[in-house]
Image (cartoon, coloured by chain):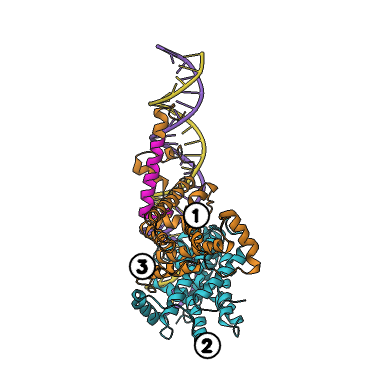
Chain colours: A cyan, B orange, C yellow, D purple
Amino acid sequence: MSTAHGARARARIEVTAAIKEAARRQLAAEGAAKLSLRAVARELGMASSALYRYFPSRDELLTALIIDAYDSLGEAAETAHAEAAHTPPARRWTVVCESARTWALGHPHEYALIYGSPVPGYKAPDTTVPAASRLAFLALDILRDAHRRSALALPPLSADLRPEAERMAADLAPDLPPEVVVAMVAAWAELFGLVGFELFGQFHRVVEDRERFFRHAVDRLARSVGLPASS
Amino acid sequence: MSTAHGARARARIEVTAAIKEAARRQLAAEGAAKLSLRAVARELGMASSALYRYFPSRDELLTALIIDAYDSLGEAAETAHAEAAHTPPARRWTVVCESARTWALGHPHEYALIYGSPVPGYKAPDTTVPAASRLAFLALDILRDAHRRSALALPPLSADLRPEAERMAADLAPDLPPEVVVAMVAAWAELFGLVGFELFGQFHRVVEDRERFFRHAVDRLARSVGLPASS
DNA sequence: ATTGTGCAAGAGCGGTGCTCTCCTTTGTGT
DNA sequence: ACACAAAGGAGAGCACCGCTCTTGCACAAT
């Protein structure tokens, strides 16, 4: 079907890829707010109106870039994790957190796109959910593994959080105790608080040796999800 | 001298305030990206070019709004803290964290302005630093008080972080042990990770009972800075 | 060979930040 | 009291933006 249409369909795929590529280049250079369809078209030597044959709106193009960014981060983390396979869970936790930070520092605008303030008026479609979840599921995998080896040491949940915690666990990881799932979600958000603060300049004149500070904070985070302190 | 100049100076102050007010209204309604000088001018019934007599650029206007936002958050937190004076530090910690979340939920666009992705090309001037620090210093006050009553229980710092930790302590709170300062800074960033995730939709279909979840996470955070668990 | 369709281009709409020029108002020094 | 300089407002205009609509061309299927 797609191959049957021949050259036409193939050209379409190629142009679509070229647009995304040019857009990603602009994104890295200037940031999402300055991503301009006209500039993309200019770079590709085509009329701005022609882009609308491929992406019905600027927001659709943004969505494509968002999914790519989540996937890029997810892949970086999964690769780092795979390279640390056969190390203890605490070590792998650190590796994954640090790979997230490294990716963010290397792709600041793409990071801002997915974990920064949402573009006003832009509503991320559910298409982005699977890509966005990769990192969280990776973290859950690590905790699952750690839990299999020896139960994670976590304080019991307060009674009023129990229902919500059980709901979350049922959704995300039915095989794990609710307190582990809750701790993981909190740590996940906190991790990106650390990364975001560093990237967005909130540590200006406060934290200088950010690498070491991050390492330390990730260690705290590991303890807060019940993993033993590393190193 | 400013009063000596009389009506002129007073008018300038009033118009400046009116511009900021209109801009803040637009900010709340549409977000920073859609803040338009022309729209502000329209609302005030003046020519867009006239605004440049008061703010040399859109970015300068943004800076003013940023400082206001930091101050608004700082004041909300300080008020909440003052109302909880004479309660134990752990309780006050919770109160301050919750006031930050409440403020953020009530002022989402202003929150995005100060803790979300920075506007590309926009460099926050050092003028914003004092306002931005209010909350951190409030948290330090609480920890200082707790520390005076009985030393906070924190694991020792790893050797390689010591120099940086001591530098941070010397800058921020020379009277507190370095590990307390480091823990506070990390918790500060993590707190806004939690708030940002909730506000920016990252908890969509993950956390439903966000109030209770946040309370729990703040409790974890309190423990991570050496405060006793509350409730 | 003709017909139908996918695609690019151009013009144009209403919007943006910002600048420059012109003109009125206002405050001050003589 | 009056002249003059400074401040502030208005308007036109520049280069840009996202997006739409119409036109014309080149290719594909029949």
The verdict on residue A69 being magenta is: no
Q: What's the residue type where badge 2 is placed?
A: Arg
Residue at the front extreme, as displayed: B149
Q: What's the residue type where badge 1 is placed?
A: Phe
Q: Is residue A75 visible?
A: yes
The span shown in magenta is: B13-32
Residue B158: x percent and y percent? 62, 69
Q: Nearer the viewer, mark 1 or mark 3?
A: 1
Please give the chain letter of the residue carrying mark 1: B
Point out which mark residue B211 bears. Answer: 3
Please give the chain letter of the residue carrying mark 3: B
* Disc 1 target residue: B137
* Disc 2 target residue: A149
Seen in the picture, residue B63 relative to D1 is either above or below; the reply is below
Q: Is residue A53 visible?
A: no
Q: What's the residue type where badge 3 is placed?
A: Glu
Residue A137: x percent and y percent? 48, 79
> Do the dots labelled 2 and 3 sit on one chain?
no
> Do the dots labelled 1 and 3 sit on one chain?
yes
Which secondary structure is most common in the magenta stretch? helix
Residue at 48% in and 72% down: A187
Q: Nearer the viewer, mark 1 or mark 2?
A: 1
As measured in the structure, the alpha-carbon distance from the residue carrying label 2 to the one carrying label 3 is 33 Å
As measured in the structure, the alpha-carbon distance from the residue carrying label 1 to the one carrying label 2 is 42 Å
As measured in the structure, the alpha-carbon distance from the residue carrying label 1 to the one carrying label 3 is 25 Å
Q: Few, some or many C-alpha atoms within 10 Å of disc 1 (few <14, some 14-19, many ≥20)?
A: some
Point out which mark residue B117 bears. Answer: none
